Image (cartoon, rainbow, N blue to C red):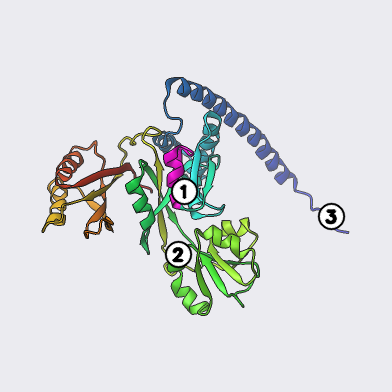
């Protein structure tokens, strides 16, 4: 007959200390929540935004600076982000549109930015995320915009052109793709289902290990995992979180071809939901522009940036679909329009453009 081992007196005493501290922490967190409720009432009367990402960043930075250890700064930040998210949910729950179903990297990016208490609205594709945010069904949306290996998410770029949403933040997420399946074996896999970007990011591994399996694109990696759970001959490429969500085995870990595989997600909203964030230590300004079709027009775009010492970090082109071989250019520059040199460069740049739209100015993700 087995018996449960008894804790030593010293360990039992330490556990009692932890239990006492847990109760003290709980009382303090609830005190903070009660003050947050009062803040929420004031914001309602004043008509000011409930969610202030700059305020969240300031609070976390102060707490990290005051941290005496042994907790690591990143862990302190994660704890306080969740506390603030839970308190914000008492003030006013933030509805956030993300790519579904549950278990997507887009969902993970939203939780990293808004905390686990955000009210997530799952959408079938990024078009729906944009539409839900533009229509006000959700206060915020999270969309993928760029992968470090496969480049831009072209559909997101196209949607920015036609919606009133602007970018107020970003999350850069380290993406690890896993092969998920009902069976704990890679034998007999007939089809691999995932988002087209994920299939492209894993093409080397798939060619080597599953050369005869069909590669079937679906709306999201989590959708691929959901479908893989319905057929033992199918496998999905998705996060471990998606595997847990749909009860799948991780047949192979981290099958992406590049170890350093990051995806940028943009946080979008209507301007009246949240205005352009104030300058931070490191900001990015994103633009869509087009220029008249004449010799040297694209070269001329770079002149104001060089003149005022503004660095360009991204330059992408997309067809304007007018049938005239015209293009829209998507540009990211370093800095905030509140800076004199950035404002001057943008003013001159706008004069050169046939079309000019600021997608947003926001703090760069760490």
Q: Which mark is residue 211?
A: none
In-image side of 289 versus 254 (left or right):
left
Q: Is residue 102 above or below residue 277?
A: below
Q: CA distance from mark 1 to mark 2?
A: 18 Å
Q: Which residue is mark 2?
A: 196
The mark that comes first in sequence, 3 or 1, is: 3
Image point (65%, 33%), residue name: 23
Image point (50%, 71%), residue name: 215
| Magenta span includes 314 | no
**Looking at the image, is mark 2 or mark 3 nearer the viewer?**
2
The mark that comes first in sequence, 1 or 2, is: 1
x then y, percent, for residue 337: 24, 38
- Is there CB contact under 8 Å for labels 2 and 3? no
x then y, percent, for residue 35: 53, 24
Q: CA distance from mark 2 to mark 3?
A: 53 Å
Q: How many marks?
A: 3
Element on which disc 2 rests: helix
- Is there CB contact under 8 Å for labels 3 and 1? no
Element on which disc 1 rests: helix
In-image side of 293 versus 16 (left or right):
left
Q: Is residue 148 above or below residue 6?
A: below
Q: Which residue is mark 1?
A: 128
Element on which disc 3 rests: loop
x then y, percent, for residue 131: 44, 44
Viewer-proximal residue among 211 and 185: 211
Viewer-proximal residue among 41 and 287: 287
Q: Which residue is mark 3?
A: 3
Magenta part of the chain: 126-141
**Looking at the image, is mark 1 or mark 2 nearer the viewer?**
1
Image point (61%, 77%), residue name: 188
Chief secondary structure of the magenta portion: helix
Q: Identify the image quadrant of residue 86.
A: top right
């Amino acid at each position: 007959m087995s018996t449960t081992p008894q804790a030593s007196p010293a360990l039992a005493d330490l556990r009692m200390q932890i239990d006492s501290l847990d109760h003290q922490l709980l009382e303090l967190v609830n005190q903070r929540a009660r003050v947050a409720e009062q803040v929420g009432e004031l914001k309602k009367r004043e008509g000011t935004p409930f969610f202030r990402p700059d305020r969240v960043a300031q609070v976390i930075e102060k707490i990290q600076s005051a941290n005496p250890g042994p907790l690591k700064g990143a862990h302190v930040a994660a704890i306080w982000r969740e506390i603030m998210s839970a308190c914000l949910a008492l003030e006013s729950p933030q509805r956030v549109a993300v790519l579904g179903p549950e278990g997507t990297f887009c969902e993970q990016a939203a939780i990293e930015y808004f905390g686990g208490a955000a009210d997530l609205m799952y959408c079938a594709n990024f078009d729906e995320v944009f539409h839900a945010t533009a229509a006000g069904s959700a206060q915020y949306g999270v969309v993928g915009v760029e992968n470090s290996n496969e480049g831009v998410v072209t559909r997101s770029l196209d949607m920015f052109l036609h919606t009133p949403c602007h970018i107020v933040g970003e999350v850069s997420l380290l993406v690890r793709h896993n092969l998920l399946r009902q069976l704990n074996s890679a034998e007999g896999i007939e089809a691999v289902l995932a988002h087209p970007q994920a299939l492209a990011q894993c093409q080397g591994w798939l060619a080597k290990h599953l050369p005869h399996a069909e590669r079937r694109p679906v709306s999201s990696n989590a959708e691929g995992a959901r479908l893989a759970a319905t057929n033992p001959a199918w496998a999905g490429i998705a996060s471990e979180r998606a595997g847990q969500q749909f009860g799948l085995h991780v047949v192979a870990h981290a099958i992406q071809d590049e170890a350093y595989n990051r995806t940028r997600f943009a946080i979008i909203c209507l301007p009246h939901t949240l205005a352009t964030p104030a300058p931070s230590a490191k900001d990015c300004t994103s633009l869509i522009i087009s220029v008249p079709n004449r010799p040297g027009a694209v070269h001329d775009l770079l002149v104001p940036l060089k003149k005022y010492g503004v660095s360009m970090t991204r330059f992408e082109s997309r067809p304007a679909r007018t049938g005239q071989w015209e293009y829209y250019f998507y540009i990211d520059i370093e800095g905030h329009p509140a800076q004199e040199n950035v404002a001057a460069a943008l003013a001159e740049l706008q004069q050169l453009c046939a079309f000019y739209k600021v997608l947003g100015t926001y703090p760069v993700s760490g």
